[in-house]
Image: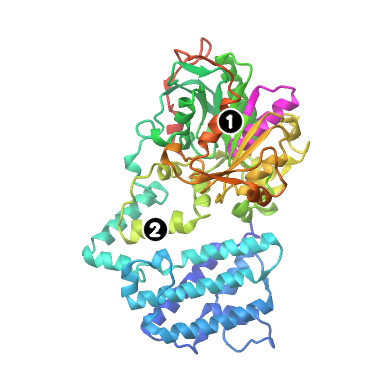
Amino acid sequence: MSSEPNWLATAQQFQQQLVNQWTKIAQGTVKVPDLAENPLMAAMQAAVPSGAGANGWGLPVGATDLFKAANGQPVSFDMGKLLEIQRNYLTEVAELWNQGLQAKPLADRRFSSEAWSKNPVSAFSAAAYLLNARTLMAMAEAVQGDAKTRNRVRFSVQQWIDASSPSNFLAFNAEAQKKALETQGESIAKGMQNLLHDMKQGHVSMTDESVFEVGKNVATTEGAVVFENELFQLIEYKPLGAKVFERPFLMVPPCINKFYILDLQPTNSMIRYAVEQGHRTFVVSWRNPDESMAQVTWDQYIEDAVIRAIDVVRDITGADTINALGFCVGGTMLSTALAVLAARGQHPVQSATLLTTLLDFTDTGILDVFIDENFCKFREMQFAQGGLMPGRDLATTFSFLRPNDLVWNYVVGNYLKGETPPPFDLLYWNSDATNLPGPYYTWYLRNTYLENNLVKPGVATVCGEKIDFRQVKLPVYIYGSREDHIVPIGGAYASTQHLPGPKRFVMGASGHIAGVINPPAAKKRSHWIGPANKFPANVNDWIASAKEHPGSWWTDWADWLKGHAGKQIAAPKAYGSRAYKATEPAPGRYVKAKA
């Protein structure tokens, strides 16, 4: 839409200016008085009104356009802060110039190799870049406006800073240049091959994808498909002992990813761990949507997938109630399904586990910068007649939440250095994208991220029922990751304020995936548990009262889940039941479909 910022064009203009500046520095043609050549200085002078310290320096297309593009319209600055930034910048420019080619970049892993420190021109360009980056971010902090405007500016400016790093350009990357000389150009040739390969496959390679195959060396826990419809396959897993708990266990992963994040390798498989604990385990494997699903709605996913899966597990096992787990969006969908069932007077789930799940979308972290009324309207117009949200678009969005780790790191390694990234099962999964039906996606955007309707009793209607989490009174185990950038710890914790039943909240170390997939045998990280039945409104108050425990949170969860699993009974000798026959071995064909 016309009101959306033209980020790419402005970023490219600003990036080119920085490249020009570094080139002139390397050639020795830039002197301290030539500050009109400096886009940052010109931007600051333009932002300071006449009589407040401005002089006659020129204004090329530069940082002010960058800040304007970040918000879609001009921004205003705190003048006191801006003048202080200007003074500090002048001082640091002079210091950098006095150091000349002896300048060294501050500690930054992008410039940490010996090749950077031994190449004076590259070291100087890195030091100049870091000075520009610090100043840009200081200017972003000086922007005046509401919290959303300030967050959007900070995020956008950080994107441009990361994209403009001299490490991303062969002309400035001393490490890549050194490797090219040592290999007599072979690394550059290999980099071009890698670039062409990635262009053909449609995404930057984060791992050697040729090493992995779903069902062969990832998603290998033994099981069988016992039910399927147009939305999902239901997989039942083979018991590993003579007995199982009488109450079966259903796992609902996010439909924006493939389920085998829960079953990467035998040593880090949460599915296998649940089976080892004696649970008769079932997992939803989502279909990767194609054009035949272009009209599928949020309601259909709730009614015909989550609720249907609950019913089928009960039918197969003969159990009156089951235990269920939802991960990320899967947890949002599971909780919504439980609210729909509660409104119908049905309570088929004994307990629920919610992993890095948002029910209350007040605190959505960095993703909030993307969502506003115009963005939602744009998507609603785009999918008014149905359609698919491409999985690659979703994957790109999530990658650029951490661009240095998930984008530029691989651009430099794959293309500038000609390296092949090492095999890594989690990154293989991360690259295995899934589409979303447009109607499902737009309902989710508006009713969660934009309007936060799920936690407003009676506001959201799903499957013909008013959603009211106050009626979902079952015991819940809620997990959040301390460094999660997709579901912030405050957002995960907020569910404690809306679910009235018995609760246990646990915080784990690390992020959205690594915090969850943390098997006990690895003996990594820590988790925190607070006083029983005490859930203050603010997550920081809970954290202050919580006690740290070494190692994985899985053992604590396993003990909790056993308390809701009932007595042990003889393990089934076959998959499914008379009405639900096994049709194909796990992981099934749905998970193998590519976006």
Q: Report whether residue 414 is seen.
A: yes
Q: Position of residue 282 (x, y in %)?
A: 52, 24
Per the picture, the main secondary structure of the magenta-coloured stretch is helix
Look at the image and give the residue range highlighted in magenta: 329-351
Instruction: Indicate yes or no whether the magenta region holds residue 311.
Output: no
Which comes sooner in the sequence, label 2 or label 1?
2
Quote the CA–CA distance across marks 2 and 1.
Answer: 44 Å
Q: Residue at x 36, y 74 (%)?
A: 122
Q: Residue furthest right?
A: 458
Q: Residue at x 58, y 61 (%)?
A: 155
Q: Quick check: 183 left or right of 168? A: left
Q: Position of residue 483 (x, y in %)?
A: 55, 51
The label nearer to you, 2 versus 1, is 1
Structural crowding at the residue carrying mark 2, measured as other residues with C-alpha within 10 Å and reported as few (<14), some (14–19) or many (≥20): many
Q: Quadrant of residue 300?
A: top right
Structural crowding at the residue carrying mark 1, measured as other residues with C-alpha within 10 Å and reported as few (<14), some (14–19) or many (≥20): some
Identify the residue under disc 1.
560
Looking at this view, is 172 or 128 the one in front? Answer: 128
Q: Position of residue 540 (x, y in %)?
A: 66, 52
Q: Quadrant of residue 438?
A: top right
Instruction: Look at label 1 and name its amino acid.
Output: Trp
Instruction: Indicate yes or no whether the magenta region holds residue 346.
Output: yes
Q: Position of residue 39 (x, y in %)?
A: 53, 78
Q: Secondary structure at mark 2?
A: helix
Q: Residue at x 43, y 19 (%)?
A: 241
Instruction: Residue 411: give its label.
Output: 2
